[in-house]
Image (cartoon, rainbow, N blue to C red):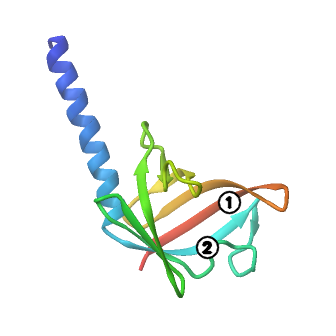
Amino acid sequence: MTVLSAMVLFIGCEKEEIDLKTNLLTNNTWDIYNVTGNGVDITNTSVNPFYDCTCDFYKDGIYIITNGGSYEGSWGFDANQTSLIFDEGTADEMLMTILELSENRLELQFLMTMEGEALILIIKAKPV
């Protein structure tokens, strides 16, 4: 196999991987059903920033979070497709590590600071 053939094959596989992840993410409305903070279930508490939320991702890079009202922003993958970047380049920018992305499950990890304390959130969602 020539170097050029190997590069074309690699780039083709990489694009298929991105397309697969994009399709998995955008083919569903995701219902956030469980949130833990530092290992403690905070799903039904006032400290849960994703309480009663659903999230739609669109292939054009737009997402909409709904929880009574709605919030729209932009999303994309990081260079390794291991994280989602929300609202890149804005004051609201967030980076969430993808722990799992499948047809039936989306699990993200997000580090935030609340009242001066570091909080590792694990956000679990399933298709509506």
Query: Front-most of 93 and 39?
Result: 93
The residue singled out by tag 2 in the image is 50
Q: Residue at x 58, y 82 (%)?
A: 52
Please tell me the numbered disc located at residue 121: 1
Q: Secondary structure at mark 1?
A: strand
Query: Front-most of 102 and 111?
Result: 111
Three-letter code, disc 2: Phe
Q: Residue furthest top?
A: 2
Residue 74, above or below 32? above
Residue 8: give x, y in percent of width and height. Answer: 17, 25
Q: Is residue 122 left or right of residue 31?
A: right
Residue 73, above or below 4? below
Which image quadrant: the N terminus?
top left
Discs 2, 1 touching: Cβ within 8 Å: yes
Which image quadrant: the C terminus?
bottom left
Q: Is residue 11 left or right of residue 49?
A: left
Return the disc, 2 or 1, that comes first in the chain's sequence: 2
Residue 50, above or below 59? below
Q: Residue at x 58, y 58 (%)?
A: 92
Three-letter code, disc 1: Leu
Q: Is residue 97 left or right of residue 28?
A: right
Question: Which is more foreground, mark 2 or mark 1?
Answer: 2
Residue 32: give x, y in percent of width and height. Answer: 54, 74
Q: Residue at x 19, y 28 (%)?
A: 9
Q: Secondary structure at mark 2?
A: loop
Which quadrant would residue 127 be assigned to in this image? bottom left
Which quadrant would residue 40 be assigned to in this image? bottom right
Q: Residue at x 61, y 73 (%)?
A: 50
